[in-house]
Amino acid sequence: MVISVCPNLSVDTYASLDSMELGKVNRMNSVQEFPGGKGTHVALAIAEFAGESSLLAFWGGATGQWMRQACEAYGVSTAGPVLAANNRKSYTFISANPSLHHTELLEPGPSISKSEFDQLIADILKSQSQGDVVVISGSWPKDSPENAYQLAVAASADAGGKVIVDCSGKHLSKALESKVFGMHLNAHEAEDICGSGEVEKVMGKLSTKVDLIAYTKGAEGLYLSYLGKIFHARLHLDEVISTVGCGDCLTAGIAYALDRGLSVAEIARYGVAFGAANCLRPELGMLHKSDVQKLLPMVEINELKYA
């Protein structure tokens, strides 16, 4: 089982508008809403492909109730503390104006108490079994402990889970102080944490702390280091509708393949196919199983050798 943890849920909102002028009234042409947050995207992707998935989060107010019902309708089982305040909204603007297209505005989300934080950690431990893959991704709500990732990772690892993290900044630094099994990072995060974006240097520095490293470099694709091997996987798409959530879906593919004990090359293949499938649909952070199945044999895989 893959257990997804989304500490800071979000209602992902696609907002279409022609232009935006600061200091003036701006009217949107249309709005679409989807259950979101990085961990939510992971859970939904796995549920669509595998038929079973679990999501733990802080469910806030009316928006949290709506997202919980939406996730369960997709086949995702849910757990976690219920908050009084609403979860946040994240806006992605769609426009013919290139300076505005895919601009994002993110609300901060609700605050949590120490007891609510402790309850989420307890729910994570209650939900997982020995050997489960646990994916913890995204930001944490306001007033969370500064070392929230470190505490969550340590608890899950102590319970026997293979913990994969997808976060940045101080959250990533703190997470690496615990028993992290795997991580997904992009070029910006690699520069920040390793001081370099070069694949060999990133893998060399992080492999002493982490068993599985999924390093994505945009159009270059995925570099995956695991069990002493490094594979480069990529896939060309003729058309991309939306890239929102593709990194989360890539993490989902890696977690799915890892949970099923596939080879390192196949873990990389599933990661890229899941991520690319997300780009083919207008729904934010979601994919279709039929797209993944079509893309899997199209992924180019090469093993890399470093001196």
Image (spheres, helix red, strand yellow):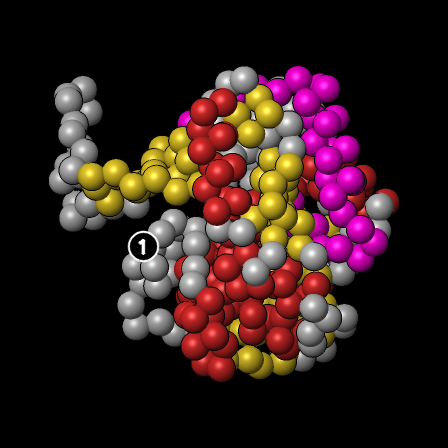
Q: On the rendered image, what quadrant is the C terminus found in?
A: bottom right
Q: Evaluate whether residue 250 shows in this view.
A: no
Residue 109 in the magenta stretch? The answer is: yes
Number of marks present in the image shown: 1
In the image, residue 67 sits, relative to residue 225, either above or below, namely above
Q: On the rendered image, what quadrant is the N terminus found in?
A: bottom right
Residue assigned mark 1: 282
The amino acid on which the numbered mark 1 sits, given as a three-letter code, is: Pro
Magenta span of residues: 107-136
User: Residue 173's x, y, as percent?
Assistant: 68, 40
User: Residue 179's x, y, as percent?
Assistant: 80, 48
The part of the image, by quadrant, that contains residue 170 is top right
Q: Evaluate whether residue 65 shows in this view.
A: yes
Residue at 30% in and 72% down: 238
In the rendered structure, the answer to whether residue 100 lies left or right of residue 250 reads left
User: Residue 191's x, y, as percent?
Assistant: 56, 50
Q: Residues within 10 Å of mark 1 (few under 14, many from 20)?
A: some
Residue 112 in the magenta stretch? The answer is: yes
User: Residue 204's x, y, as percent?
Assistant: 71, 62
In the image, residue 130 sits, relative to residue 299, either above or below, namely above
Residue at 77% in and 33% down: 122
Residue at 50% in and 64% down: 274
In the rendered structure, the answer to whether residue 23 lies left or right of residue 254 reads left
In the rendered structure, the answer to whether residue 280 lies left or right of residue 17 reads right
In the image, residue 240 sits, relative to residue 67, either above or below, namely below
Residue at 65% in and 24% down: 144
Q: Between residues 260 and 19, which one lies in front from this camera angle?
A: 260
